[in-house]
Amino acid sequence: MPSFLLVDDNPLVCSVLKFLVKEKFSRCQVDEPENLQAALEKIRKKNYSLVMIDVHVTDADAIELANSLLEVRRDVKILMYGISHTTSLAHKYLELGIMGCLAKDEEEDEIQKAIESVLNNGKYISPKLFYGLTGEYSAKF
């Protein structure tokens, strides 16, 4: 049974993501820590299939949070999501060991594609990150 950790300080966004994940990945477990410290504690205790982190969580810098999670559990699969990604930032995340970057305003099918890609050990960068910058899609990374 896949297990997900959703790290987002917006309860509405968390609820929507949780609903989407449970709809697309039936029989999964979804945990929602209330802050950075709780996320780290959960990662120490459990090997999650996927950790989804909002780039703009208020109690931590997203890169510091991802690095902390990777220090605790090097093999953790992390998918960052947010509104203000850039291609260069997405590439920086991938270089750090984060497996994917998702634009927060992607359609449901693209969110599912991102999750499946990372769950299957693939790298993922949202098409909207490329379209917004170049007008064309190029997922070479």
Image (cartoon, helix red, strand yellow):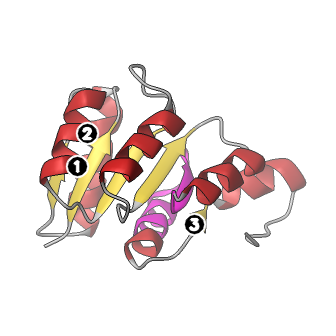
Residue placed under numbered mark 2 in the picture: 40
Q: Mark 1 belongs to which amino acid?
A: Ile
Among all residues in the image, which is located at the extreme bottom?
Answer: 120
1 or 3: mark nearer the eye = 1
Q: Is residue 64 left or right of residue 93?
A: left
Instruction: Please name the residue shown 68% across and 61% down the image.
Output: 127
Which badge, 3 or 2, comes first in the chain's sequence? 2
Give, as a single range, the part of the protein colored magenta. Answer: 98-115
Q: Position of residue 90 (x, y in %)?
A: 66, 51
Q: How many other residues sit within 10 Å of disc 3, few (<14), some (14-19) or many (≥20)?
A: many
Residue placed under numbered mark 1 in the picture: 43
* Res. 65 image quadrant: top left
Q: CA distance from mark 1 to mark 3?
A: 22 Å
* Residue 138 in the image: above or below residue 84: below
Q: How many other residues sit within 10 Å of disc 1, few (<14), some (14-19) or many (≥20)?
A: some
Can you say which quadrant of the picture contains the N terminus?
Answer: bottom left
3 or 2: mark nearer the eye = 2
Instruction: Please name the residue shown 73% across and 44% down the image.
Output: 86
Q: Mark 3 belongs to which amino acid?
A: Tyr
Residue placed under numbered mark 3 in the picture: 124
